[in-house]
Image: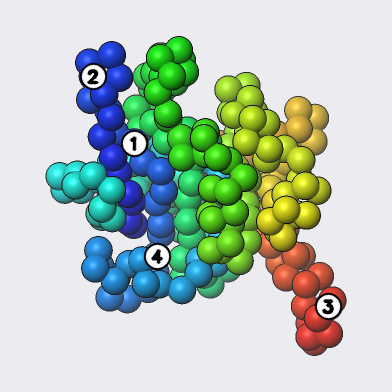
């Protein structure tokens, strides 16, 4: 797993920012050839980077190997099911501060500190991210702060996302509360359910797309 990290100062504290990560099963991946890879099989939008940290010292903006957390291991299982080679992970907020995240997010917003690559020009940034992947997946979970950010970036209008970026978001939706379920909902049974539902959705989408193209399915 590879990630792009930056350091930022918030109220005198140094914090990590991670705008993007990539899980790759390609052989021979390194910091020198990583960005030359072809497009990813999918990009998933989650709330925040979680406990993902670099394995070595951070050189601002450079791609570096990083230690996966439980969410990323769940995404690896999805990739294995789908026989994918690469997945991008982007966030509604790029703050890598775990349990202190919500308090830090409020401090950043109050101080006018940019905590996401999508704050200044969301449509252009989303276009850059989405155009480099074959599929768009939502998985930011149930937090009200996540919904607020997603709405601010224009992600909740799925029809507009399709019209603007050419991809309809795929998600395991909570049909009652209307949020895209997180890939790792903690309990083993719920994790298995998310994985099973997502695989089914992706396979259904592939069936529809191939049928429309006249490809035998």
Q: Looking at the rendering, which quadrant does residue 191 occupy? A: top right
Q: Are marks 3 and 1 in contact (CB under 8 Å)?
A: no
Q: In this figure, which residue is indicated by the disc labeled 1?
A: 17
Q: Which mark is residue 13?
A: 2
Instruction: Determine the CA span between mark 1 and mark 4.
Output: 21 Å
> Where does label 4 land, which residue?
24
Which residue is denoted by mark 3 in the rendering?
211
Out of 102 and 159, give the one closest to the viewer.
159
Pick whichever of labels 3 and 4 is earlier in the sequence: 4
Of tags 2 and 3, the one toward the viewer is 2
For marks 2 and 3, give the CA distance.
Answer: 54 Å
Residue pushed farthest left?
Answer: 57
Q: Earlier in the sequence, mark 3 or mark 1?
A: 1
SS category of the residue bearing label 3: helix
- Dot 2 or dot 3: first in sequence order is 2
Residue 117 point in image, percent of width and height:
46, 40
Q: Disc 1 and disc 2: Cα gap in Å?
A: 13 Å
């Amino acid at each position: 797993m590879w990630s792009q990290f930056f350091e930022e100062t918030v109220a005198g504290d140094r914090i990590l920012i991670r705008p993007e990560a990539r899980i790759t099963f390609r052989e021979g991946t390194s910091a020198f050839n990583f960005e030359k890879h072809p497009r990813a099989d999918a990009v998933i939008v989650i709330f925040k980077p979680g406990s993902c940290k670099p394995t070595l010292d951070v050189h601002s903006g450079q791609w570096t190997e990083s230690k996966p957390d439980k969410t990323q291991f769940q995404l690896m299982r999805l990739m294995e099911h789908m026989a994918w080679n690469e997945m991008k992970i982007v966030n509604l907020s790029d703050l890598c501060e775990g349990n202190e995240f919500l308090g830090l997010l409020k401090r950043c917003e109050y101080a006018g500190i940019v905590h996401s690559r999508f704050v200044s020009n969301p449509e252009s940034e989303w276009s850059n991210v989405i155009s480099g992947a074959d599929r768009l997946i939502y998985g930011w979970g149930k937090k009200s702060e996540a919904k607020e950010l997603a709405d601010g970036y224009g992600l909740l209008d799925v029809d507009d996302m399709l019209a603007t970026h050419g991809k309809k978001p795929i998600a395991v939706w909570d049909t009652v509360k209307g949020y895209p379920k997180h890939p790792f909902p903690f309990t083993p049974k719920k994790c298995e359910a998310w994985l099973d539902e997502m695989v089914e959705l992706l396979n259904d989408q592939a069936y529809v797309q191939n049928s429309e193209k006249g490809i035998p399915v």
